[in-house]
Image (tube, helix red, strand yellow):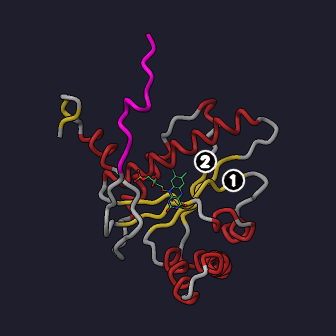
Amino acid sequence: MTYSGVLMTTFQQHLMSRRTVYKFTEDEVPGDIITQALEAAATAPCHKHTHPWKFYSIGKKTRKSLIPDVQRLAKIKSEKRGSTNLEGDLQRAVEKIINVPVLFAITTKRNPEDLFREKEDYAATVCALHNMVLSFWANGVGSMWSTGSITREVETYQNLGIDMQKEEIIGFLKAGYPIVTPSVKKPSYDQLTTFLE
Ligand SMILES: Cc1cc2nc3c(=O)[nH]c(=O)nc-3n(C[C@H](O)[C@H](O)[C@H](O)COP(=O)(O)O)c2cc1C
């Protein structure tokens, strides 16, 4: 593959081909691939070496504890949309949490006393999360960062044992082998870049 006349490295190909994946096969992701992704996350850049992120691997038992809240939130969404298939909507919402092969919650350290540090820490946490995404991708595993309402509920913090005063969930990451890899139109880099003399 070439881009701008320069041969792309494999790494560049991974960066550019990565897409958010929404539908996964039921195949398990091998533990070694998950460990590699966590190792990639742990090496993310981090100003002041605060390492403000935490990854929570959400297993089957903990996922089940989320079901009542997933259903409650799905009901609100379904009614708002005027859906005629509430049962189906609830089932789909639960399946998205229960059936996904890999599920993580990622948190960043709160720091209300130092909002600049909190902002830098959030940036570092995003780098860690994206390192995980790219490591998965290079191993053929797709993922989806989700900031759906379940990630922001008090009950979710309680069910995952996360201290809401100290950490903020910046999202869930769902991962597995892609059924479909969507194509997305992206702007060209020159629309997003200003070259100053
Ligand atoms: C911070 C963040 C939050 C996201 N939250 C959601 C979400 O809640 N639901 C969803 O369907 N996709 C979510 N996404 C995925 C984006 O919709 C996706 O990145 C976007 O459509 C561009 O596609 P691409 O990732 O394939 O380039 C999120 C992405 C980011 C960066």
Question: In percent of the image, x 52 and y 35: which residue is there?
Answer: 45
Residue reaching furthest to the top: 197
Q: Nearer the viewer, residue 171 or 44?
A: 171
Read off the residue under disc 1: 168
Q: Secondary structure at mark 2?
A: strand
Question: In percent of the image, x 66 and y 67: which residue is there?
Answer: 160
Question: In percent of the image, x 38 and y 66: which residue is there?
Answer: 176
Is ligand 1 less than 8 Å from the beta carbon at label 2? Answer: no
Mark before the other along the chain sequence, 2 or 1:
2
Residue 53: assigned label? 2
Residues at marks 2 and 1, CA–CA distance in whole angstroms: 9 Å
Residue 122 vs 33, above or below: the answer is above
Q: Amino acid at mark 1?
A: Glu
Residue 187 belongs to magenta span = yes
Residue contact at pointers 2 and 1, CB within 8 angstroms: no
* Percent coordinates x, y for residue 69 in the rendering: 67, 77
* Percent coordinates x, y for residue 84 in the rendering: 56, 88
Q: Main secondary structure of the magenta part?
A: loop
State the quadrant of the C terminus. Answer: top left
The boundaries of the magenta stretch are 185-197
> Would residue 57 be found to the left or right of residue 112 on screen?
left
Q: Secondary structure at mark 1?
A: strand
* Percent coordinates x, y for residue 78 in the rendering: 61, 79
Q: Residues within 10 Å of mark 1 (few under 14, many from 20)?
A: many
Residue depth check, mark 2 versus mark 1: number of the one nearer the observer: 1
Q: Amino acid at mark 2?
A: Trp
Q: Nearer the viewer, residue 145 or 80?
A: 80
* Percent coordinates x, y for residue 19 in the rendering: 37, 54
Is ligand 1 less than 8 Å from the beta carbon at label 1? Answer: no
Residue 175 belongs to magenta span = no
State the quadrant of the N terminus. Answer: top left
